[in-house]
Amino acid sequence: MNKLIYRKLTFDIFSFFILFSLAITSIVWVVQGVNLLDIVSEQGHGLKVYFIYTSLNLPKIFSKLLIFTYFLTLFVILTRYDDNNEILVFWINGIKKITFINFIGKISLIFVLIQLFLNLILVPYTQNLKQTYLRSSSIEFFPNLIQEKRFSDVTRNLTIFVEENQKNGVFRGIYIKEKLNSDESKIVIASKGKLIKDDNNFNFKLYDGNITNIDSKGGISLKFKETTYKLSKISSKTRKESKLSETRSALLIYCLNKYIKFRKDTEIRCGEKNQFSIKDIYEEVFKRIIIPVYLIILSLISSLLILKPKESILQNYFKIFLFSVGFTLILFSELSYKFILSSIVIEFVILVLPIIFIFLFYGSLLIKSKFRMSYL
């Protein structure tokens, strides 16, 4: 009988968590998707690229929201059990409150493992994958980036100006400036031209103009009647460097272990091409590994709901108080990494604080539930 009761509780928790997570993750994904429309409007990528790029953001969104959705799930389920007197089924069948709390703790360990998997493996992988995919994608909507009588920085190191964009696809009064390197650039002027798509890349077919190459020694100008200006090698505005959030956890942990004594240093750098400071790596590793532990603490806070006050008038205030404590703890956990760069004492306190909280709340539950060793 006890197995059936626990099975129903587990099903209620996981089903509510999945539905609530899908709902809130979808909302955040749509809002972020609107903000990322510049991939199409400003960078010229196609809708397929846009959809895949934004979809690869889902693991990150889900991971960020997990700590809140899990706390709210437990809070709602336990409140519902209490309000409907379903919680009495556990006590009637001889299940002790501390045993019930331990079961909730075991479930929270599953969510901790899920969060660690997301933080350490899946999220960095998908974040790196989406940026790599964007960098390698063709600029399908390139023509839409060129506007009349306006200097358009359509891609990296490339500026295009056209006097007129005719309905038949012909451009008139064309000015193109391409920066080849720090000391060399190319300027192309043509009376008219047309974009030609070839193998998913665009090239300019230009007529009646001249090409000027400029470097530190001067410039050389050549006239032409007809030429093709190749855009296949032109890179988009998409950044080439990887962010810290896109870097493999194994590399970050290796760097932190190598420079553990200098973990707060802003000058020492590590990672691929040494682009990250060891201080930033320390913060990132903390966020990926330590913050998930707060899920256990939040499960203990939610478990306090079964130890409601005797006076019914205080019960609602007690729930509000517990929810406020839990929500405050979520905010603190998300900001706690900022304190590890303070003094050694504060850093030590922040690192061991999750363990202190676990013992504190679990101890309170032991006392309130009139714990005996025979209950375990």
Image: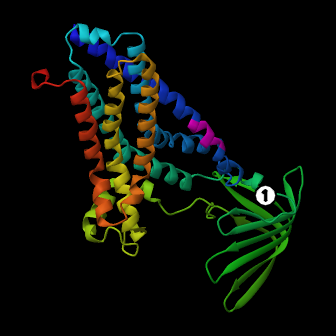
Name the spot of residue 244 as percent of width and height, x first. Answer: 43, 59
User: Is residue 146 depicted above or below 188 in this figure?
Assistant: above
Q: Residue furthest left?
A: 374
Name the spot of residue 164 as percent of width and height, x first. Answer: 90, 60
On screen, residue 136 versus residue 310, left or right, reads right
Residue at image x 23%, y 27%? 102
Residue at image x 78%, y 83%? 221
Name the spot of residue 364 as percent of width and height, x first. Answer: 26, 33
On screen, residue 225 versus residue 96, left or right, reads right
Amino acid of disc 1 = Ile
Q: Nearer the viewer, residue 197 or 105?
A: 105
Q: Which of 9 and 277 is in front in this view?
A: 9
Q: Let me know if residue 111 appears in the view.
A: yes
User: Is residue 270 depicted above or below 2 in this figure?
Assistant: below
Please report the bounds of the magenta region as a residue range: 28-34
Q: Let me know if residue 271 appears in the view.
A: no
On screen, residue 369 versus residue 156, left or right, reads left
Most frequent secondary structure within the magenta stretch: helix
Which picture quadrant has residue 306?
top left
Q: In which quarter of the image is the N terminus?
A: top left
Would you say residue 30 sits in the magenta stretch? yes
Residue at image x 82%, y 73%? 189
Residue at image x 39%, y 70%? 274
On screen, residue 323 versus residue 105, left or right, reads right
Residue picked out by circle 1: 146
Would you say residue 262 sits in the magenta stretch? no
Name the spot of residue 101 as percent of width and height, x first. Answer: 26, 25
Q: How many numbered marks are there?
A: 1
Q: Which of 299 and 192 is in front in this view?
A: 299
Q: Nearer the viewer, residue 143 or 297?
A: 297
Q: Is mark 1 on a helix, strand or loop?
A: loop
Which picture quadrant has residue 47?
top right
